[in-house]
Image: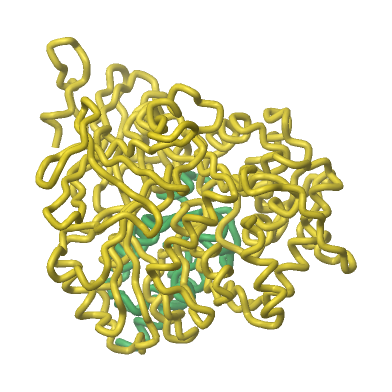
Amino acid sequence: MFMEIEAIAPVIREFLARNFLFSDQGFGYADDASLLGEGIIDSLGIIELVAFVEKQFGIAVRDQELLPGNFDSVSKLSAFVHGKFTDAG
Amino acid sequence: MLVQECLTLSAARLPEKTALVCGDQRFTYRELDAMSDRLGHALVRDGVTRGDRVALHLPNSLEAVVGLFAALKAGACFVFVNPSTRPDKLKYILNNCRARALLAPGRAWSGELRDLPRDCPSLRCGVRCGPDGPNPPPDLASFQAIQAEGPVAPLPRVNIDLDLACLVYTSGSTGEPKGVMCDHDNVQFASAAIMTYLGSREDDIVLCALPLSFDYGLYQLLMTFRAGGTLVLERGFTFPALILQRIQEERVTGFPGVPTLFAMLLRMDRSGFDLDSLRYLTNTAAALGPAQILALRAAFPRATLFSMYGLTETKRTLYLPPDQLEARPGSVGIAIPGTEVWIEDEAGQRLGPGATGELVVRGRHVMRGYWEAPEATALRFRPGPIPGERLCYSGDLFRMDADGYFYFISRRDDIIKSRGEKVAPREVENALQLLPGVSAAVIGVPDPMEGQAIKAFIVAHGAPVTEAQVRAHCRATLEDFMVPKYIAFLDELPLTSSGKVSKLGLR
């Protein structure tokens, strides 16, 4: 599976909006907003988010990759997922 | 000795030493001492006086550390509130202790806390910490602006060690949180006893990922500063790989954890990390299983592992000397130095080896009771053999072996221990029953990662509700750690013959 980085972010935004903000009005935060810092998700939420990206994008997240630099904002997570495609390709 | 002397005495002795590492920021003892003097003066200027309560609704951060010492220097008693606590419960706590001042994130003051001062008449002073949200309330001071003020003199000492240093709110089985009153002497005595058996040293570097609102996290700060060491303060353990990275980068020597955190670390591939700097690990809040103890010792062969037990009402109560770990892996040990414990049956008779009874605690770490809750206080804190002294009746059932080592059997109440936090089923049930037409029963179920996971059984009497609605409602009303992991729907709740909900058959 390969997706352009521009196509990845909207999928993540929608997941966050639907599952954590309980909103059908979209995500409403900047893509570089800290998911934990803004209280958008908590530590259990991160586990749900990991499960979601693994399934949705068909990637495997290793424990060592579970870092704020990869998961703490929409833009970081999009870049991380994109990097996975590039590594695999 | 007053609690703030953890900071001031080390600042006098080791002014240029790094005391605190928060993310990529580092602060010396001298800087923290000066920052807390500035904030302390600002609190006094805004009307905080001796004995007032100053609440800190902050994540682990520079502002939380400085805020705690500033409150003490102003002569006040600090009250940490978990940063994930929702506004309604925060209001309950602030009104319960009649807080005079509240330190909270600037973003929260612009958002969910904007109307708070209206509902909390005792509040005279608020401080905005960290980045502001839109339209920050102009009448509140900002932490940053206070710190931009010039040098200030240290505040005069106004307390003695019988004054309260902090209230630590804890969940009770009634579901209403109660504030455990800790005086300066209680805190300093407990810190010194724990430091004695850990062998705390000036060259210790302690990593704390536990919230400062949890007394286990709070004492990491107090003990590390008292020893003149360095505290690496993390926001939480959401990213276990980050913790391993920090241990490696900062050459951490002391690492306090809870079973959930250790389970996460044991599951990970740690081969890329150099963790040899670790001198000790501590565990409390829930027991480690014998298999987990073996796995931890194999994973961290250079580190000494301390298994411990405590309750907020006495801070720490028992610890297992590490040389006993092999012989008694299921034990949480003996009384901490300078204190004593025994077990009693319901008639108040002391029991010998092998018998099961309630653990009773005697020592200067037995706190001063619950804030303005005389009935609950009388139940937990009872007179001792010498007039005027208090014993703590733990409410937990224990057994002692022939050599005097103690083993935890069970709690007397139905409190759930999940991710190291105490959760009262009643509090979660009360929240769930705010959903129209819903009745609910909440239990803890065994969980390899969380110790106990929270499971809610829901009966919808009116319109049907979905799991997503229940979850959304819980996220909006409860702290993170209280949100049920499992939700099951039933047609009706099982009842006892007297018509009360029977949880015995629920799994």
Examine the image and state in which quarter residue B60 appears.
bottom right
Q: Quadrant of residue A85?
A: bottom left
Describe residue B497's horizontal placement relative to residue B343 as left or right: left
* Placement of B486 over or under B406, stated as above or below: above
Q: Is residue B110 visible?
A: no
> Quarter of the image containing the N terminus of chain B?
bottom right
Apparent side of residue B495 relative to residue B273 in the rendered image (left or right): left
Looking at the image, which is closer to me, B399 or A19?
Answer: B399
Q: Residue B149 appears at what percent x and percent y?
A: 88, 64
Q: Name the image quarter holding residue B436.
A: top left
Q: Is residue B199 visible?
A: yes
Q: Position of residue B496 (x, y in %)?
A: 14, 16
Chain in green colour: A
Taking the spot 45% from the left edge, 22% from the top edge, the residue there is B375
In the depicted structure, whether residue B120 falls above or below residue B337: above
Q: Residue at x 64, y 43 (%)?
A: B163
Looking at this view, name the residue that lies furthest to the top.
Answer: B498
The C terminus of chain B, quarter of image: top left
Residue B117, given in percent of the width and then of the height, sits at 72, 34
B451 horizontally vs B213: left or right: left
Q: Residue at x 83, y 41 (%)?
A: B47
Q: Nearer the viewer, residue B414 or A49?
A: B414
Q: Measured from the top left, where is residue B180 in percent x and y?
A: 50, 39
Mark count:
0
Seen from the viewer's position, the closer of residues B372 and B469 is B372
What hue does chain B carry in this figure?
yellow
